Structures are given as C-alpha cells and as structure tokens.
Image (spheres, rainbow, N blue to C red):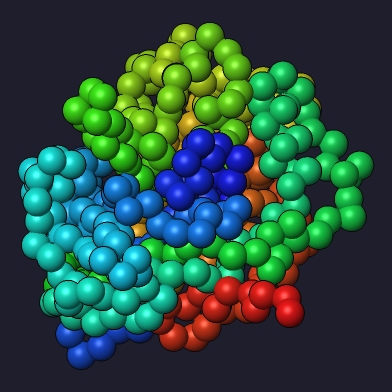
Amino acid sequence: MSHHFDYPTDETLDISDAYCFAGPGDRHGPRTVFGMNTSPFGAPTWNAAGYYELKIDTDGDYVEDITFRATFPTGSDGVQHVQVEQLTDAAATDRTASGTIITPPNAPIGQVVECSNGIKLFAGPRLDPFRNYIPYPVTTTNCLAAGTFPDFASLGPAHNDFANTAVRSYVLEVPVAITGHRRVHFWATTAYFDTGHNIWVQTQRAGKPNMTTFFAFATGSAKVPDYNSTAPTIDLVGRPAHPATAPASGIWGQVRDNIAAVVEAGGTYPDFPHSFPTARAYGAWAADALLPNVIGFTPGTVALWDPWCDIQNGKGVIEDIASNIIKMIVNQDFSSGLEPGPLLDYFPYLSPPPTPAG
C-alpha cells in the first residue's frame, strides 16, 4: 500500500506498490523479481505515452545502474502491446536515452513473455495482492500532520478494503548475471513527456510503503514539495551531523520531525525494544531506517520487510507491510490482523484479476 492515496490526475501513471523478492533459482544462480502495480482505481489502459520504469542500483550509491523501461504502444488495430528497454550505466538515469529492447516484437499484454538474457516479463491486470484497512493509513497520515497519537482500537473491526480489486502489474524476473550477487537497491517510477516544456516529468517514485502517502501530505516547515518527482539521492539531504539533536531539513528532516511529534504525543519513544531518551532521537532512528526510499535486497535470499524489527531485505507481496510501516511511526507493535489474498506459486506470482460480475 505504497501510493494508493497520492494518485496523480492521470491514474494510468499512478503507482500503488513496488516490490522485490526472490524468484526460483536455476543452474545459473538466483533470480530476482522486480515489479510495480499501477492504476489501482481501474484505469482501462496503460498510458501509451508514459514510461513505467524499474530502477536498480548495483553499487550502493543510490543512483540507478540499470533501468528496465516499459512502454505500451498502440498498434493500428487499437491493441496495446508492451515493449521493454534495458538501459545501463549513464543511460539508466537519462529519460532521453535509448536502450536495448529485450522484448520480442508486439509482445502481448496479459501473458508471460520470454525476453532476452533469460528475463521473464508480465504486464497486465492482476488481483491487488496488498491488504489494508483504509482508516489505518488515513488516521496515521492525519496524526503525522497534526503531531497527535493514533487510536487504532477505535477504528475496527478491520477488513481489507483492497479485496477483489484489480491493478495493472509490470513484473520482471531477472537472472543474477544481470544484477550481480551483491545487495541491490530498487525503486519504481513513472513519467510522461511535457510537450509544452520539452522535458520528461517524473510523476511518481515508489519504494518502501506509504512514504509519499504519509509524508508528502504531512505539513511542517521541512516539507519537501513534490517528493514524487525526486530521486533517492535527495533523501538524505538535510540530515545533520548530529541527527538526534540538531535541526534538520529536507525529506529526512520532515520524516524525523513528523515521527518525533507522534511518539512524543504518545509517550512511546522510550518503549522497548527501541528505547530512546528523546522523541527526536527516536525520529532520527526511524528516518535513518526509512530513507533513502529504496528497497534493498540480496539476490537469492528470503525477502522480508519489517524495519521495526530491524529487518529490511526486499519487500514481498504476502507481507503485512501496511502494519509494518505503522510500527515505525508509533514505536509499538501493530498488526491489522488481515490475512493475505491468494497468490500463485509461479511467475508472475500475482493472481489473475477478479472475474467481472455477470
């Protein structure tokens, strides 16, 4: 539930989630699944003029070394197909650059496609795999903005508001020969070309859950406008040398100070297992755990994202990530109690979309 509430005017470019986990290895080594879900409110098509990008940093500097850029051109018969380019090195950061096309001609939407270099692709409608009870993130966002502490017990009983809803998924399964064996950083973006200004405009950036939902809408002197348009390298700008005590700015400062205000209001900052002498010190720990807003993953390992328990390795589609991000905000154990929906045990792992009534 990364982005369900920060959707742009053009819903086709709305990222609802990004995820990264291990696929089944083969005799050549591990394989990693990278994906994004878009259009959570039922946009009928992909944006034929937009870019849907999966970005991978392989050397630890939070700058993409590989970009898998998907586009969805429409043929003369009005049918969309999918094309994926692989861009590397400097080209991976440049939306005006061209890369190597890894898809066969006229690759179909809604089917598994075998691409170059052993990469698998799926782009099409799927059942939304993530679960959440909307009052939980809405209340959390309001508390971050107001500096108050949430009363989740008063909001139940919880149910999954995303049950039986469809998204458009863009998923790749990539061999380790392409990513390398070392830990990678992953995030997803969408973009469109602004003809009036002759420039590509990044519409959204997704990594860890709810970051733009919680902090792009929260108010405060440190607010960073249009956080979705930025890159991970900006996420630590404004972090002071003494993060637990000194004034801070930028998105890092906003995350620290918004969280600090919540745990100050709830009096939870000294609580076990993350006991800190001040609310600001807890907020600094949380900001360091949540930023930069990328998903770190070591190929071939088990994915689990629960930073309150000091675990950040990938982000799967079965985890209760909505609860895990709330733990970071309140410094308390928390669970929505919601069960995961059905998944496949083979690529693309996400289940087919709901069957229309009638």
Left of 238 or right of it: where is 325? right
Front-lying residue, 43 or 65: 43
- State the image coordinates of residue 192 (x, y, percent, origin top left): 31, 40
Q: Which residue is drawn at the image coordinates 34% and 30% (left, top)? A: 230
Q: Is residue 48 visible?
A: yes
* Residue 52 horizontal/vertical position (percent): 32, 52
Residue that appears at 31% across and 47% down: 50
Question: Does the rendering let one see residue 293?
Answer: no
The reply, left or right, for residue 313 in relation to residue 41 is left
Residue toward you, 84 or 270: 84
Identify the residue shown where x is 43% and y is 46%: 13
Choose between 16 and 346: the one closer to the eye. 16
The picture places residue 318, in percent across and down from the top left corner, at 58, 69
Residue 137 lies, in percent from the top left, at 69, 41
Q: How many numbered discs sit on the rendered protein?
A: 0
Q: Quadrant of residue 21?
A: bottom left
Residue 30 as seen in the image, left or right of residue 335: left
**Between 219 and 25, which is closer to the camera in this rendering?**
219
